Image (cartoon, rainbow, N blue to C red):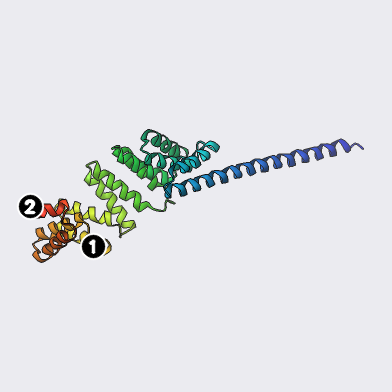
Amino acid sequence: MKNYPLMRLLVLAGVLVLGACATNAEKQGEQDKKDKLIDTNISLGIEYMQRGKLEYAKEKFEKALEIDSSNPEANNAMALLLWRFKDFDKAEYHFNRAVSADEQNAEAQNNFGVFLCERGKFNTAVKHFNKALENPLYKTPAQANLNAGLCLIKGGNKIEAEKYFRAALEMDPKLPVALYHMGKLSFETGNTLSARAFMERFFSISQDTAESLYLAYKVEKTLGDRNAAASYRIRLKGKFPDSPEAKRLASNK
């Protein structure tokens, strides 16, 4: 009989533990439902964006943010949408929320970098590209390196830009934009043979552009290969007769 109180306490403790487990399970279940609902709204919003139904996309992103205003994916998606609407202040606000909530969100960091570069904030943009590159799980680091290089070119920092273009090509040797810019930078710094090599690689994987043909023409002309220069000249005039580059040829610039 003396053991009854002790047994009742043990039973009560067991009930309390089971109750706590049930409560935690319920909370986790509720959170899982919220997360699923957020993901569903984001996915639908992105699908609407891709189909050009931007107002519907906005509604879906707003629903996701109503559930969790700090969700990085929802904020990143909303920022991209508002960017398309040219609502730059609000887009920047949501980009900031996205990267503040999750610094390891490489996609948001890269997107924010592109956005800031377009707005002329070159140094800050590169910091976000670097943040994206710090994530070892980032699936497209070559693109972030390329974006950083392009941003630095836009900001007038060609020396730093070259480092990022080289890094991008180490990760993906078949990036036409990086090959073109490395060819251009090499030519501008007097490394003409290197410029030729980059342009040959460019043409092996990419279609002709007026800019690339004009650069290749200048490279071959500088190297003294008249036949190669003439070939690029003919291709430029034939494919892009109204381009600024074709007009430069006509004026011998």
In the displayed structure, 249 sits above or below 124; it is below
Q: What element carries label 1?
A: helix
Q: Residue at x 47, y 43 (%)?
A: 56
Q: Viewed as shown, does residue 114 lie left or right of 14?
A: left
Q: Is residue 183 above or below residue 22?
A: below
Q: Earlier in the sequence, mark 2 or mark 1?
A: 1
Please state the horizontal and vertical placement of residue 25, each as a whole percent of the image: 67, 43
Residue drawn at x 18%, y 54% is: 186
Q: In this view, does 103 lie to the left or right of 171?
A: right
- Disc 2: which residue: 251
Q: Nearer the viewer, residue 235 or 218?
A: 235
Q: Which residue lies furthest to the bottom in this view?
A: 227
Residue in the picture at 43% in, 39% down: 99
Residue 160: quarter of image: top left
Q: Mark 2 and mark 1 in contact? Answer it, CB < 8 Å.
A: no
Q: At numbered mark 2, what does the secondary structure look like: helix, strand or loop?
A: loop
Going by the image, does 70 lie left or right of 217? Answer: right
Identity of the amino acid at label 1? Phe
Where residue 165 appears, as percent x and y from the top left, is: 28, 52
The amino acid at mark 2 is Ser
Q: In which quarter of the image is residue 116?
A: top left
Marks 2 and 1, how far apart at CA: 25 Å
Q: Would residue 175 be seen by someone viewing this image from the given angle?
A: yes
Q: Is residue 12 above or below residue 235?
A: above
Q: Which mark, residue 3?
A: none
Q: Name the residue under label 1.
A: 203
Quadrant the N terminus occupies: top right
Camera-near label (2 vs 1) is 2
